[in-house]
Each structure stands twice: as C-alpha cells, then as structure tokens.
Image (cartoon, rainbow, N blue to C red):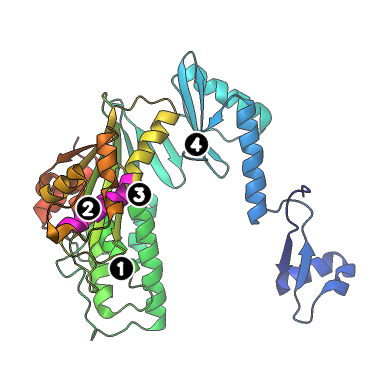
Amino acid sequence: MPRECPQTYIRLNRFFTEVMVSIDARFLDFVSENGTMVLKVNKALYGCVIAAKLWYDMLRSTLEGLGFTRSAYDMCVFSRNSEHGHTVLTVHVDDVKIFAPGDSERERVISELSELFPGLKINRGPDLNYLGMKFEYRSDRTVKISMPGYTNALLERYDVPRVHTTPAGDELYDIDENSKALDADRQEDFHSTVCKLLYLGKMVRNELLAAVNFLCSRTQSPTEQDLKKLHKILGYLRGTPNLGLILGADDALFVRLSVDASYGVHADGKSHTGACVTLGRGATHATSTKQKIVTKASTEAELVAASDMYGQGIWTVRLLESIGARVQGLILEQDNLSTIALMKNGKPNSSRSRHIAIRYFFIHDKIKDNEVKVIHRPSEELTADILTKPLVTERFNALRDALLGSTS
C-alpha cells in the first residue's frame, strides 16, 4: 500500500479463516475466540474503499498523461481536444465509454489504452451493452437506451397477470392507517422490488418515478394498500416491457429544464416536485421528490421546486461546455404564471407572498444575468407534470412519450 494511504485491515469470517489455516497452519496463532481473523492489507484489495481510490487515481493519471483533462463538473468525465474535435471518455469503475468525432480518433484512443492495459475487452458498433443497458445508435443521430433483460427478469420474478395503462391511480398519495401490515417476508420482498423499480426508473423508465418514489417512503412498514400500488406499477410495466429512453439533441443546443410541483399532496401537507432536463429529445435527467418544507400556496410550492431544481439545469450547461459543446443557453419551463412573475420581479407581489424566503428569489438574479430564460408552458404540455402526480391515460401517454423521447 502507498505510504500516504491509511492502514487498512479486514476481518475474515469463519469460512475464510479455516481456508487460510488449511493453507498455512501458522495462521492458527492469529485466530480469535469467535473463529475469525483480522489481517493487515499490504496491497490494494478489490472491494476495499481505498482500492477504488487507488484505481481511480491511477486511471486519472494515465488519461491525463495521454492529454485528457478531467471535467470540473464530473470527475468521471475526461475530454481531449484535437484538430478533429473533442474526444470524451466517461468512466464507471473500469468501464470506459468513448465518444469521438470520428473513427480515427476513436481508434487512436483504443490503441493508446490497449498499449497501457493489455487484454482490454473492446466493443464497437451501433449496438452496445454497457452497465446492463442496451445502447442502439441510430442513423437519425439519436440513441435508444433500454434494459430488456433487467425488465423481463423483474416481470418473471413478480408475476402480476393484470395489465394497467398507467403506473399509479388517483389514490397514490393516500395512506390508509387501517390497512393491514405485511408480514416480515413480504416486507422484505416489497422493499427489494421497490429498489429494483427505482433503479429501472432512474435509468431508462423515468415515467415510473412519481409512483416508485412514493413507495420508497413506505418500505419500512408497508401495508396491503402499498402492495396494491406496487402491483399496479408492475402491471403497467407488464403492458409496456419494451419501452426505453430515446435521446437526441437539437442543432441549436439549448438545455431545457421543465419543473412542476403538486401542492400539498402528501399526508403531512408537503408538496411534490418533478423536474426533467432535455437537450431536444428525451430526458437526460429526471427526478421526482417530496419537498422538504411545507408551503402555504401552490405558487410558493412551484417557486420552491424551481429553486431546488435550477442547479441541475445550470450543472448540465457547465458540464457540456467543459467538454466542448456550444450551448446556446438554459431555458426554464414553468406552468404557473404567478410563479414566473415572482421570479422575474425578484420580490413578493403581495402580502400573501411576503413570507417566502429570499433564498428562493435567487433565480431572479440569474434572469438578470442572462443565465436563464423563463418561459410559460401550459400544464398539458409541461413534461415535468408526469413526475409529480397520477394522470389519466391519454395525458399520461402524451407526457410519457415526451419524457422518454418517443416523440421529438
């Protein structure tokens, strides 16, 4: 281990302790009363926190030695500029994805890395599997990202025969205190299923997030009512197993941040925020979350949502700029005219809104500095609406298609 690293120890369980003793009887002197053994780690060992850091430090040093620069906005994104354009690498542990301006630059990076890391497994082509996701690059400069294997395995594990047209009904946020609690085994299964759906929703099925996010708050003590809501999500997934996320960017590159809030929908009076970011087609980021404070009006809830989500929009702009993209600007889409007026005025419009904290008016400064343009989008066209509450089938389908990029 490098001298600058903290000393690391691991405890072997009984099974591995017995294996060590069977290999060398001298280890018997170090076995504790409970049959385990503590070892001092002399080299980086896979699974230890320090091993991951050492690997990252080595990889970063290697890439920087090849002329790549780490993004200031994401430590796992590296870029290198040449006469052909920007080459970008995204890193996930030891998986590296290459985005190059042409074949020659791509092959150059592959050659450089292969020389430094012999035995690399290299995948090329329009169809790639990466981190459990299937990437299909299309001739129209879009990419479809799906998780068919993960989705099918989930549906086979939890057989729900009934198909639903939406993942949640009007009763999503209702809590029946008299509903019977699930037994221990079903609680564990409920928790596991919700976590799997959350992963799927975060990756490629963003339209699940509002329903799944609420069930995440119910995993500690789920009831029969919660189980029915879970079955509705699975029933919707059974009817739409092949959907995926289609991403594309407009030629005039604007970052569009769609933000919405459902006022006071939770049992404790708090509102719910939904937001998504797009570069033209499909959401590059989507979130659905309960607000942390109680607001006194829908206008305030919308303002809190916009304030909390603004950071994601400006981060996307900065990240793209750091890898050479020419971003035209950030557009914030809102459906509440009163909220837009508050942001543009930078002060309360009346005594009814004077209690709103000054910190939620910082978007006003961004508007003055031309960092963001706020526009009105009718509720039926605001994509983020699907991330805040249950919707009827027709409206749900329209916003889902916009969110997932099924419609440009």
Could you classify mark 3 by the number of other residues whose Cα lies within 10 Å: few (under 14), some (14-19), or many (20 or more)?
Answer: some
Residues under labels 3 and 1: Cα distance? Answer: 23 Å
**Circle nearer the viewer, 1 or 2:** 2
Question: Horizontal and vertical percent for residue 261?
Answer: 20, 56
Q: Is residue 405 left or right of residue 68?
A: left
Q: Are marks 1 and 2 in contact (CB under 8 Å)?
A: no
Q: Are marks 4 and 3 in contact (CB under 8 Å)?
A: no
Quarter of the picture containing the C terminus is top left
**Circle nearer the viewer, 2 or 4:** 2
Q: Are marks 3 and 2 in contact (CB under 8 Å)?
A: no
Residues under labels 1 and 4: Cα distance? Answer: 35 Å
Question: What residue is rendered at 42% in x and 25% in y?
Answer: 324
Question: What residue is rendered at 33% in x and 70% in y?
Answer: 217
Towards the viewer: 335 or 371: 371
Does dot 4 land on a helix, a strand or a loop? Answer: loop
**Circle nearer the viewer, 3 or 1:** 1
Q: Which mark is residue 215?
A: 1
Q: Is residue 306 magenta?
A: yes
Residues under labels 3 and 2: Cα distance? Answer: 38 Å
Q: Which residue corresponds to mark 2? A: 303
Q: Which residue corresponds to mark 3? A: 148
Q: Which residue corresponds to mark 4? A: 72
**Circle nearer the viewer, 3 or 2:** 2
Amino acid found under the numbered disc labelled 4: Ala
